[in-house]
Amino acid sequence: MTTLMTCLKERQIPFTQFEPMSRHTTFRTGGEARLFVMPKSEQALAQALRLCAQCGEKPFILGNGSNLLVPDEGLDRVVINIGDGLDTVKLLDHTTIEAGAGATLAKVCKYALDESLAGLAFAYGIPGTVGGAVYMNAGAYGGEMKQVVSCVRYLDRNGCPGELSGEDLAFSYRSSAFQSMDVVITSVVMQLQKGDPTVIEAEMRDLLGRRKDKQPLEYPSAGSVFKRPEGHFAGALIEQCGLKGKTIGGAQVSEKHAGFIINIGNATTKDVTDLIAYCQKTVLEQCGVLLEPEIKCI
Ligand SMILES: Cc1cc2nc3c(=O)[nH]c(=O)nc-3n(C[C@H](O)[C@H](O)[C@H](O)COP(=O)(O)OP(=O)(O)OC[C@H]3O[C@@H](n4cnc5c(N)ncnc54)[C@H](O)[C@@H]3O)c2cc1C
């Protein structure tokens, strides 16, 4: 670890020790990461990956932490945060944009709007990075990343570049090829269409309004906890079982949207995972449906 820190320092790659992960997850839970690395360029990311591989470390890759549960006892490993420095958005041709994996979806959606490009409005309001959104095939209101992503560039664990496109991206409901690959997404190419900016902006505003009306955005959470079970809605099943408002410690099934678990104050990750398990057990017993978590528990 000392060697790794010395090498990171020599290459001026910023890092901190014992970083509280509650600062980096939208649930605001999770213990400390042993080493938290913040590369500010793709080159620095490649160097950090190479150094980790040489030191026998397998870093966890963090985007905006908006779909994550980190254990309360922390992470005895390196975390690499893909954020600013890897967040450039640029136009490749008049309908194609490329975004760094650390760019937020909000930034990319606003960029597309400024270029009068339609097709991404569905993603406005999803609080993740582009890298996290591709990894998860994030989607909402009938849209998903699958519909717009044409090519994804990545680095492997030794910092060597590669790319995937088309069928190889293996997008399916909240899943992509990257969930079974050991790589770090660095940038994403998206194919959009020319549109009327007034119409695009109205759609973005409408979808954001619908989120504010239906979702408990005033509390920390990780969005919908469970995947949509075939033929059902997770929130409706949880509500049907009388679990709205069910509280364990500081974690609560939202009164506003039963598909969300919220942190109502000082929740621990254990509170959240216990409540997830309680919802799963109750819904299975009463409705015969097994709810599968959408959020990633490290
Ligand atoms: C209020 C709220 C509303 C939400 N609404 C929606 C919604 O409507 N639709 C939806 O699909 N999701 C929604 N989410 C969940 C979440 O925002 C998405 O899953 C998002 O895509 C996660 O991106 P992230 O950058 O935060 O990823 P993280 O949470 O940081 O990571 C998620 C996973 O992706 C991996 N990962 C992240 N970046 C990279 C990278 N560059 N390379 C390789 N792997 C990477 C991580 O290792 C982890 O396994 C919501 C969350 C919240 C809090």
Image (cartoon, helix red, strand yellow):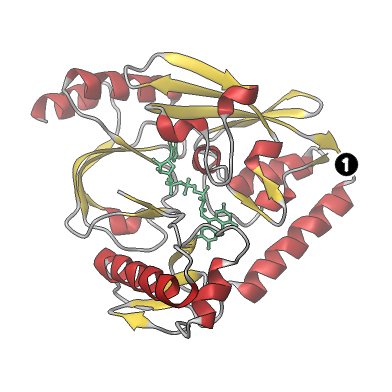
Query: Label 1, on which residue?
Result: 195
Task: Give the residue drawn at x 74%, y 27%.
Answer: 96
Residue 266 placed where, x, y %? 29, 74
Q: Is residue 40 above or below residue 16?
A: above
Q: Is residue 246 above or below residue 269?
A: below
Q: Is residue 247 above or below residue 187?
A: below
Q: Amino acid at mark 1?
A: Gly
Residue 175 placed where, x, y %? 52, 41
Q: Is residue 2 above or below residue 66?
A: above
Q: Secondary structure at mark 1?
A: loop
Task: Give the residue drawn at x 32%, y 17%.
Answer: 158
Q: Is residue 212 toward the left or the right of residue 218 in the image?
A: right
Residue 208 placed where, x, y %? 69, 63
Which residue appears farthest toward the left when viewing the image?
Answer: 2
Asked if the residue at label 1 sits under 8 Å from ligand 1, the reply is: no
Tally of marks: 1
Task: Give the residue drawn at x 47%, y 29%.
Answer: 185
Q: Quadrant of the N terminus?
A: top left
Instruction: Out of 28 and 227, give the one closest to the viewer.
Output: 227
